[in-house]
Image (cartoon, grey):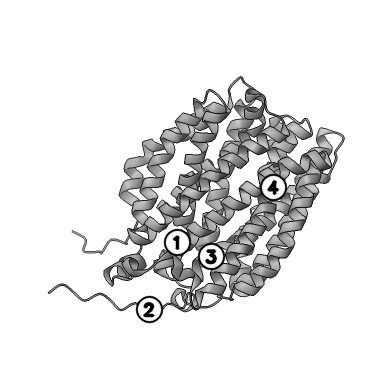
Amino acid sequence: MSGAVPTPRSPLPALYGLGFVAFVAMTLPMFCMPYVAKDFGLGDEGITFLMGVISVGSLGTFALTRLADRRGRRRTMLLSFAGLSPLSLATALSPGAAFFAAAQMGALALHSTLRMVTTVAITELADEGRRARAQAWLGFVSGMGGAVPMIVVASLGDRPGGWRYGFGALAAALLAWPWVRARAPETGRFDRAQALGVTDKARAGDLFRGAYRRRATGLLLAAMLRGAGLIGLGHWTFYHGVHGLGLSGWVVTAIFMVGGTPGMLGLPAGALLAERWGRRPTFLLGLALELSGGIAFYLLTPTSQTQAILQLGAAFFVYNFGSQCHSVADRLVDTELFPTALRATYAGMRTIAEAVAAIASHFTLSALIVGVGALPHAITFLSLATVLPSAGLFLWAASETRGLSLEAASLEAPPPSPPEAR
């Protein structure tokens, strides 16, 4: 009989799986928008207003992320995962826009929490010096999750009510509950902080005191400004291709595949640059590419399907490469600069900032369309007016964390091991 000690199972694959589900749930509504608008009889103003209403659901994420800092990462991830299925089923059965919005408001709170807490847990569980690589893998798996709704909706969207099948399929994710429950991990850093009583003493207001005040205030304001522009750029790409340019769902899918697939190289590039060059410059480089490629996607006017695939595919490549590069550095900064007892709380506040940004973005676009006459011009104006000033705020607030341990980066003393029970 062999006496070899079995290799401990890595907790990261389970977290990547949860990230996959979170991004499927996040991107599915975006690809369904042209068909939802058609079924519910909504124009550009109406569908952007509907998305503004749904965005209010992100405000519920704060309470759940506080739960992650008080009671654990695992408990919060399991709760969020379990709650997504009934809300997805309710969305699939929506008889009208109001019911659709109500179901998606709840779903948004849950998948935003799942996405944020999964990111926190990966940073806490990854080996020192490999956090950038771990976050890049999360981005890759999440990107695959984002592609699934695109393929499903492109296949079924033109059928009457075809978009509903996508939400029905997402509801079936609950079948994976036994696997998720058995493998969703708790992090050692949270366990130590809880054993020492740190998690019970920490308050959300601690983020705005002492050494963390500048970090939290500046990064949240930057995220709010930046989010308003980037949500406008990213959320309406599929809608613009189908509804604005009159392309079929499959042609837009081809554009995304031509540009988006090689654009995923932004993930390893982001991880490499974040470790060798630094989090801050990697963040800014990715943001610049994302902004320029996204604006080009909306302003190009191809005259044939071939031109659309080539021209819009090239613009989408620049956009997606920059987005993936930027996202790696963004996740690292957000999770490395705050201590264990406040890490998920900050993530929840970041979600509130994104919620405010999404609400402002959708409602502002709805109003701007009346003034400028077209969604692409409204998106261009909004993104330039918000993303550029956000970069200065980011530089003011974010310290460089390249090469630092998580405790050093977050200004948190390494906690001593809790005393053994006597």
Depth check, mark 2 against mark 1: the one in front is: 1
**Residue 199 drawn at (x, y percent):** 34, 67
Q: Give the class, few, some or many, for how many residues have Cα within 10 Å of label 4's Cα (few <14, many ≥20).
A: many
Is residue 338 positioned above or below 10 on the image?
A: below
Distance from the alpha carbon under mark 4 to that under mark 1: 26 Å
Helix, strand or loop status at disc 3: helix
Q: Nearer the viewer, residue 12 or 279?
A: 279
Q: Quadrant of the N terminus?
A: bottom left
Mark found first going from the N terminus, 2 or 3: 3
On the image, which quarter does residue 173 sit in?
Answer: top left
Mark found first going from the N terminus, 4 or 3: 4
The residue that disc 2 covers is: 414
Helix, strand or loop status at disc 4: helix
Task: Evaluate whether residue 31 shows in this view.
Answer: yes
Q: Which mark is residue 334?
A: 3
The residue that disc 4 covers is: 232
The residue that disc 1 covers is: 345
Please indicate whether residue 34 sits to the left or right of residue 1 in the image: right
